Image: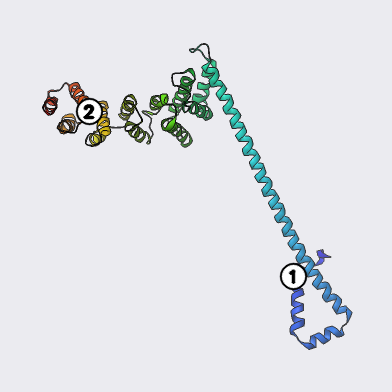
Amino acid sequence: MASHVRPGCCVFDGPRRLRRLTSDGPRRLRRFASDGPRRLRRFAIGILLFEALAGSGACDRGAKDSRAATTSVGGARRRETTVSTATTGDRAQSGTIRKLFDDAAACGDRYHCPPLEELARRAEEKDDRQVLAVAFDLMCDAQVQSASRLGDAAWKVARAWLHGRDKVNGFDAGARQLFLDGIRRILSGGSPSFIIPAYSLLQGRDLSEAPEIFKTEALNPQRDDVQRSEAVKSLHFYLKDLVLARTWLSSKDPRMMDAGARLLDNLDHSLLKQTEEELPLLLATARRADLPKPVALMLVAHVASHEDQAFLPVLNVFAQSR
């Protein structure tokens, strides 16, 4: 029956007939009543058909919504299953990689070690970032020392990965983030023995974040003298003038003055205006009454290394003021 119903007729015909019946007053009501059962049946059938089709449409929409919801939930379940499987796979892969590191640490011949060679190959040639991630995990482990076989393997694999990036002229965004996050993890709370090895991985890299990391490390009160010296030494890759050295030497903070003296000694002096800029800076610093003795001694040694008669007045100022 529904196949012969004109689309929309039942949606509008029932209420229209009902409105016409009620609005036309007693005349239509009398005609409707006098026409007897035939009109009543036709009207009732129209109303029933309208309600049935309207209900059918709602059920169809409900069924579609239900199917959509089921599909959506099923999709979510499939996605959750996929993510769960991927996560499980990642963990299994990391476990396999960690075993290779353990095998490398236990390798009888450190000059020919197949597990270490496999790790380095995957890191360098295949850009295997899971291998790098496990290497950083080991270097961040306070129980792993850089001088141990396991620590040495982790550092060598990270270096191999960097060598691979050098071959392709740098980092993509993901590699850059992974590498910098690993370095920051080591410096913010990893194994203390990996501080200087981490500097060696970062220094000279064409990364805009590198100078700021080394500046922070040079002033880090948690670093010892050797570590601060290495951080300052790493800065010379990025500096071509005296701006930072002047800022630190002009400070009243002893730690900054110390870093400034170390930095001045590590800058590439072929890039500096020595007599025009460095000499006045040294003279002004030598006259400071609050200059810590260790800083003064570092600057005296630096002036002596110039072997330039023009810098002798600096030594005279140091001699007179101390």
Please name whichever residue, 129 or 181, is drawn nearer the observer in this view of the structure: 181
Q: Which residue is mark 2?
A: 295
Q: Which residue is the site of mark 1?
A: 11
The N terminus is located in which quarter? bottom right
Query: What numbered label is drawn on residue 72?
Result: none
Asked if residue 266 is positioned above or below residue 31 in the image, the reply reads above
Q: Amino acid at mark 1?
A: Val
Q: Nearer the N terminus, badge 1 or badge 2?
A: 1
Scheme of colours in the image? rainbow
Is residue 44 visible in the rendered image? The answer is: yes
Q: Is residue 246 above or below residue 160?
A: below
Count of residue discs:
2
Q: Residue at x 75, y 81 (%)?
A: 20
Tell me the SS state at disc 2.
Answer: helix
Question: Observer-nearest residue: 29 or 246?
Answer: 246
Judging depth in this view, the residue of 258 and 172 nearest the camera is: 258
Percent coordinates x, y for residue 199 in the rendering: 38, 27
> Mark 1–mark 2 contact, CB under 8 Å?
no
Query: What x and y, as percent, mark residue 271?
Result: 24, 29
Residue furthest to the top in view is: 109
The image shows residue 107 at horizontal and vertical percentages of 53, 14
Image quadrant assignment for residue 297: top left
- Amino acid marked by disc 2: Val
**Image quarter for residue 269?**
top left
Q: Residues within 10 Å of mark 2 (few under 14, many from 20)?
A: many
